[in-house]
């Protein structure tokens, strides 16, 4: 009788834990070894820049499963260790502690890493990043004692960190090289909404500004301006290990968001078991900043973020936004308007040309615009 199969999962985050869960749900009864670099149980990351960063409470809620789940489902969880080498010919991986493991199937679920600064002073102790729960704990502790910080980057992590810092009473300056926050993702019109939101909450936005150096007492910009800061928080992007073909969107996508880590592992698990599998879930993400809540579904290729139709009131920050290509909705978002996500998703999935005036008219129910 052949030995039971061994599946190794390299990575210790949400995707890794959901892959192990999916394998068991699909009936796999062989050995599962899950190898994670961090010393913690696999956990979800969105709270690290939102509620958990602000309060630190209910830490147990960030974990995908408790320790008992891994025991009960015979998942050999190896924390605080990494895969350092893969020998595909021998079907073996080498771990950072020197152990070699044989595998029948190997799943890479190592996720993303923050992009690092390269300017002079980038390695100072007061330069912080936000990726892990330990990063979030350190940042929260820093905010509790800081008078002012500089946030480098006006993307999702940077803006959520700025909101958390303002909630803690810290003075915040955000340095962004583009002319608006979130310009590449949302375009100038919606980027201006987020700029106004943060300015209303006392954030000093330095847009179109380059970073020249981190100094002992803050940062120096490319134009020579010096900004005092007790700490510098860097949020300038990351690249994900998964760059998968999306059959509905007709191309390869790298989506560094929670929904991918939540939903993609079930497809990977079925593929590992030799079953037909395709990942066609639309990209989805959300943010919470001050009193603004937003959900976004779909995908806007680089260079297409400018063609947007608005339904609602930008000034009140209560609106829907639709990004179009050839009059077809390719992405949509709701800002402080709830119970619309299913309709927005259906509009993107329909991929049918729409009348722009009807799309912008709040008197036209969205469901009337959804064509099979």
Image: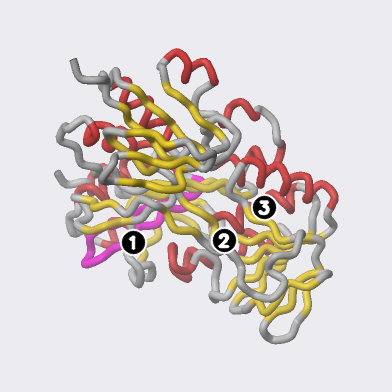
Magenta stretch prevailing secondary structure: strand
Quadrant of the rendered structure where residue 162 is? bottom right
Alpha carbon distance from label 2 to label 3: 11 Å
Q: Secondary structure at mark 1?
A: loop
Q: Give the x, y percent position of residue 49.
A: 61, 46
Q: Does the magenta run of residues contain 84?
A: no
Q: Is residue 331 above or below residue 216?
A: above
Front residue of 199/368: it is 199
> Can you identify the residue that label 3 sits on?
163
- Left/right of residue 340 with respect to residue 119 in the rendered view: left
Q: In percent of the image, x 79 and y 55: which residue is there? A: 170
Q: Mark on residue 194?
A: 2
Q: Are marks 3 and 1 in contact (CB under 8 Å)?
A: no
Q: Which residues are magenta?
A: 319-336
Q: Give the x, y percent position of residue 319.
A: 46, 53
> Can you identify the residue that label 1 sits on?
300
């Amino acid at each position: 009788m052949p030995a039971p199969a061994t599946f190794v999962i390299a990575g210790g985050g949400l995707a890794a834990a959901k892959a192990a869960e999916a394998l068991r749900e699909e009936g796999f009864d062989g050995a599962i070894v899950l190898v994670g670099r961090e010393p913690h149980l696999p956990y979800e990351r969105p709270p690290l820049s939102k509620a958990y960063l602000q309060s630190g409470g209910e830490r147990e809620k960030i974990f995908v499963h408790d320790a008992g789940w891994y025991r009960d489902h015979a998942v050999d969880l190896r924390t605080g260790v990494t895969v350092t080498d893969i020998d595909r010919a021998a079907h073996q991986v080498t771990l950072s502690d020197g152990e070699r493991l044989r595998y029948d199937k190997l799943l890479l679920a190592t996720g993303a890493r923050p992009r690092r600064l390269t300017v002079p002073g980038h390695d100072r102790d007061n330069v912080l990043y936000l990726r892990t729960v330990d990063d979030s704990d350190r940042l929260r502790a820093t905010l509790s004692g800081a008078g002012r910080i500089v946030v480098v980057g006006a993307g999702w992590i940077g803006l959520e960190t700025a909101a958390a810092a303002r909630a803690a009473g810290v003075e915040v300056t955000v340095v962004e090289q583009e002319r608006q926050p979130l310009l590449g993702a949302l375009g100038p019109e919606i980027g201006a909404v987020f700029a106004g939101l943060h300015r209303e909450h006392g954030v000093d936005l330095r847009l179109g500004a380059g970073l020249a150096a981190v100094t002992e007492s803050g940062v120096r910009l490319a134009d020579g301006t010096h900004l005092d800061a007790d700490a510098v928080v860097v949020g300038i992007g990351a690249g994900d290990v998964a760059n998968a073909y999306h059959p509905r969107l007709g191309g390869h996508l790298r989506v560094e968001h929670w929904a991918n880590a939540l939903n993609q592992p079930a497809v990977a698990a079925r593929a590992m078991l030799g079953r037909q599998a395709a990942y066609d879930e639309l990209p989805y993400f959300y943010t919470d900043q001050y009193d603004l809540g937003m959900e976004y579904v779909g995908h806007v290729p680089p260079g297409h973020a400018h063609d947007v139709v608005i339904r609602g009131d930008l000034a009140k920050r209560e609106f829907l936004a639709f990004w179009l290509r050839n009059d077809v909705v390719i992405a949509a978002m709701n800002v402080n308007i709830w119970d619309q996500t299913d309709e927005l998703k259906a509009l993107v999935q329909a991929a049918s040309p729409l009348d722009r005036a009807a799309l912008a008219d709040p008197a036209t129910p969205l469901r009337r615009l959804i064509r099979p």
